[in-house]
């Protein structure tokens, strides 16, 4: 088997500092949301590091030149609902020209299997680079299901971005989608019996939306 695509742990001190604050159990919903927003902006920088650029003709006050710009319209952020939406605004601040797709999945609480309830992507996916946003890579079931479904639209490339991953989730993704690079701010110790990442940060969706 080919070597799987790399797993990049974004170790920038600002990301690690904000993740530590965000993990803490007594943090308000507002602070959780703000920190996730800030982290997503910083992670966008890493995830887009090798984005293709094209040269355009411009004029500075002194002379004409050719200068690179990002093909922003080629990027599609794919939000895995609902926690993935906490990652979106920060990414869009950094790549404002990107399109956005949504995949609705819920985890069956007994089987932990991902069940799809919504799927909407922009047109011409074959021309786009997809960046899948899902903060918690736990069992990997939803991540694999999301990427399975996304691949049906044949995007030009796919990357997967999480905030916290479990080793089990990373292994599951690498087994099913070895071509998809993973970006995360941390790989935690393990999953518990309920499929939660430990030490983790709890239920990201509940903490983001204050629904606990
Ligand atoms: N989803 C979450 O929100 N948290 C976990 O720990 C696992 C899955």
Image (cartoon, rainbow, N blue to C red):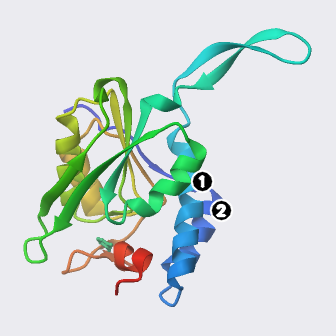
Residue 176: give its label.
none
Which one is in front, 70 or 5? 70
Q: Quadrant of ligand 1?
A: bottom left
Given contact means CB atoms under 8 Å apart, are the residues at marks 1 and 2 in contact?
yes
**Image depth: mark 1 or mark 2 in front:** 1
The residue that disc 1 covers is 42
- Counting residues from the start of the chain, the first of labels 1 and 2 encountered is 2
Label for residue 14? Answer: 2
Q: In this figure, what is the number of numbered marks?
A: 2
Quarter placement of the C terminus? bottom left
For residue 7, side relative to residue 152 (left or right):
right
Q: Residue at x 20, y 80 (%)?
A: 194
Q: The residue tagged with tag 1: helix, strand or loop? A: helix
x, y percent for residue 2: 24, 31
Q: Image quarter for residue 200?
A: bottom left
In the rendering, at what x and y percent does residue 81 appear?
A: 30, 61
Residue 178 horizontal/vertical position (percent): 25, 39
């Amino acid at each position: 088997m080919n070597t799987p695509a790399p797993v990049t742990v974004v170790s920038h001190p600002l990301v690690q500092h904000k993740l530590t604050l965000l993990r803490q159990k007594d943090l308000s919903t507002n602070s959780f949301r703000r920190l996730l927003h800030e982290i997503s902006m910083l992670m966008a920088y890493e995830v887009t590091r090798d984005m293709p650029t094209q040269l355009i003709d411009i004029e500075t006050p002194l002379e004409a030149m050719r200068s690179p710009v990002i093909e922003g319209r080629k990027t599609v952020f794919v939000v895995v609902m609902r926690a993935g939406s906490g990652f979106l605004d920060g990414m869009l601040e950094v790549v404002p020209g990107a399109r956005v797709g949504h995949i609705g999945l819920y985890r069956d609480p007994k089987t932990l299997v991902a069940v799809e309830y919504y799927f909407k992507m922009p047109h011409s996916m074959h021309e786009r680079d997809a960046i899948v946003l899902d903060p918690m890579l736990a069992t990997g079931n939803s991540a694999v299901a999301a990427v399975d479904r996304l691949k049906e639209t044949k995007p030009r490339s796919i990357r997967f971005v999480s905030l916290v991953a479990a080793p089990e989730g990373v292994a599951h993704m690498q087994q099913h989608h070895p071509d998809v690079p993973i970006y995360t701010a941390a790989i935690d110790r393990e999953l518990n019996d309920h499929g939660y990442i430990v030490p983790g940060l709890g239920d990201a969706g509940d903490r983001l939306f204050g629904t606990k």
